[in-house]
Amino acid sequence: MTTVRKRPPRPPHFAAARTYAVGSLIVAMMLAFVGPTAYGAGHPASHPAKAEKSGSISTLKWMIDQESWPTLDPAQATWRGTLQPVGALIYGQLFKLGSKNLYQPDLATGYKLSSDGMTFTMTLRPNVTFQDGTPFNAAAVKASLTRDLSPALHCTCLAILSPVKSITTPSDTTVQLQFSRPDGTILEALSGTTAAYVPSPTAVSKEGQTYGLNPVGAGPYRVVNNAVSSSLTLSTWSGYWDAKNVHVKTMQVLSGNSGPSEWATLQSGGVQVLSLPFGNPTVEKEAISAPGLKVTKAFAYSGLVYLNPGKPPFNNILARKAVEYATDAPAISTSLYYGLQPATAQLAGSGMVGYPGIVKGYPKYNLAKAKSMVKQLGGLSFTLNGGNTPSAIQESEALKKEWSQAGINVTINELSAVAGIAADEAGNYQAATGAYATQPAAVSALANVIGCPSLFDPAYCNPQVNALLAQAESTPNVKRQASFVRKAERIAMVTDATFIPVTEVPEITIAQKGVKGLVVAHTMVYASGVS
Amino acid sequence: MLLRMTGKRLLQLIPVLLGVTFITFAILNLLPGNVALAILGQNATPQAERELERQLGLNHPFLVRYGDWLNGLFHGTLGRSLESHQSVASILAQRFSVSLELIIVALLIALLTAIPLAVLAAKKPGGFADRFASVVAMVGLSVPGFVIGLALILLAAVKVKIFPATGFSPLSSGLISNLRSIFLPALSLSFVLFAIYSRMLRADMAEQLATEDYVVTARAKGISSWAVMMRHVLRNSMFGLITVVGLNLGTLLGATVIIETVFVLPGLGSLVVTSITDKDSPVVQGVVVLMAVAVVLANLLTDLLYAVLDPRVRYGQSGR
């Protein structure tokens, strides 16, 4: 008789244990997979969508990190939504910013500045119309600039246009600006700020307060659909004066979310261009090694630390100098940013018009000196107001660690951008990290940072710095501007030791190699001629 | 009785709306900065800020501003965005449809997978379906939604390129492209829902099969086990499921914030994040009103569904 041997019964908990073991393994694999490969770090070069042949793109999709356009009215554009580069697609611009500090004609064909710098005469392109058929002429430009100068509309261009005393129109294609003082930054205003964009006066009058939702310009593209701060669909129109040089029929601008999914969208071919106005070294590193992508960047600004000289402990210059000597910017550049955001001894970005160059005499990292200064002070502790985004927190923590090596104790306060500005205004800070809104030219950017009253560091005011910046703003010659700015910075950074640059932050544009005609000049991206 | 219940629920909406909007307004008021700073940013001189605050009415006391907003609400208007000047109602109309579609598709995916698996799992405890459902449920409960979302993007959009990684394609662009754009976000959202629904339903059904007299009676009468499951046990268990689905709606609306951010969807979730950051209070208040109404109506719908499933509720007797 054959005995059938039965398998012994499994313990009752076996099935449950097996289930949980398998489940745990799956969870662990997911976390391990998603973590490092979210950005493709350590992953073989990404496989972007096959680039289309030049000239064959009918729709270009362009994702811009954290792009926001609550309104497309240039006179009311908010600080976050400065309409760069979208504004140029809808409105064109009076002048274009070219490389090598040269300004190129666009809707304006030429200019003349009087010898005393008090009158600026601009010649407009003839026979141009807005998208609604309204003539683009001197009256329209005057109306636009008058709106820009209205305090009620709080244009982000108000400060740079402040020297404009009056506007006249000697002819249908001539606009003259008279200044209250010599103005060396007017071309910057008419090319790189919202003052460069001229809306149709008919549309403005008709739409009133809601004009910004349905803008009408004289640029290459008109708005077809506007999902505010989410997606903007643009299409060409036949009346554009330079229609023969516009090759892409439809452009869709999408707002990105500053996360791994933006990069994934480019890799999967969901968009052809990805712009990162605030930089992203992880994505940049991956994109550089990706075979089908081209990376262009312009160093638009510097991340910096500013100290409050009106409040302890930084009302003592020794404390300020101690922090300067304790800051190892090259180490931060290497450890956090793979060297892609280089350390700098300059508050302006090297991609700006009139970049003044490195400030000579700016103290280099010297831990021994920093320690000695802290010892002389009997110790140094303060609160650092930093941003609340992951990259801002990372940088604040890195600075804290560096400073701790010199015996400096730091508490970090993580604040949103709005909360940070509120704290600055109230003088409620000892030290803060920050970066200023991008301006095309160094002189305007730094006037906001180190000029008095400084929008960044309201407690800082040095009349010598102000005088030098005023001279820079009055000088049309870009090289002379840079020279004045450099002197002003030397006082603010070296003599007064109030501003500490850390790294230069690039504005990055990554495009599939098949996308031709994208122009990056200084900090401006022009896409009207892409194909 | 049903009409009375519906009327009572709709009346309850008033104190709920008053409460949530007041609390939201108060919290927003406590946050540092204001929308004038968000608009002016680093160009915010004290004078410019004061002038803009005056223009936007932000210089009035907190209660006056809340009262003005409430007055507008009683007159049927939600006001205008302080940043874009667009009417809040039109902003919500644009965004609500996206979030609604996301939630509906996520619920459908969760229910269409959870119910059959729960039935199979309850029918054969410890079997393959039971263990498979347990594993997926554990993943759904332990892995955050945004991690699931990123994993799906990498697998299904970057590696295999079946679905778009981000963005939303409206219905006007075509049904297929609309469904493709919503599928991955909805799937990410549905994982945790599947976990809750499948485990709850499975446990309830298994308990009924083991302990309820009517099951024994039905089997004794010769009714097949599948018929017992589908016609009797599942129907009884649906009460619990409906309650959980209804209660879940509030959580789902909150979960859309993260999923919409990961997948760059132009819905209510992403809208509320930017509006809170910029302290655009009319928009935040509008979203809060909409969500409060949605939650109350969902609870009402849940109760009405009880009446459909249970005649005892319909005729006014005590329910299960």
Image: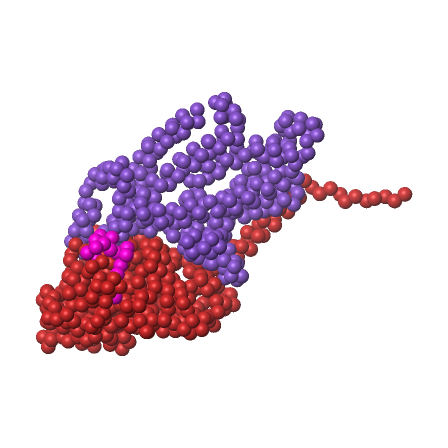
Name the residue rendered at 16%, 54% in the picture: A152
Q: Quadrant of the N terminus of chain B?
A: top left
Name the residue rendered at 20%, 67% in the picture: A136
Name the residue rendered at 44%, 27% in the picture: B2
Chain (red): A
The one of A391 and A431 positioned closer to us in this rendering:
A391
Compared to residue A295, the image places residue A34 above or below, namely above
Tell me if B107 is positioned left or right of A278 in this view: right
Tell me if A7 is positioned left or right of A95 in this view: right
Image position, residue A505 (x, y; %) = 33, 66
Q: Chain B appears what colour? A: purple
Tell me if A333 is positioned left or right of B117 in this view: left
What residue span does the magenta drawing correspond to?
A204-218
Q: Main secondary structure of the magenta part?
A: helix
The one of B158 and A232 positioned closer to us in this rendering:
A232
Question: Is residue B102 shown to the viewer in this render?
Answer: yes
Image position, residue A96 (x, y; %) = 25, 72
Find residue A124 and report its image quarter: bottom left
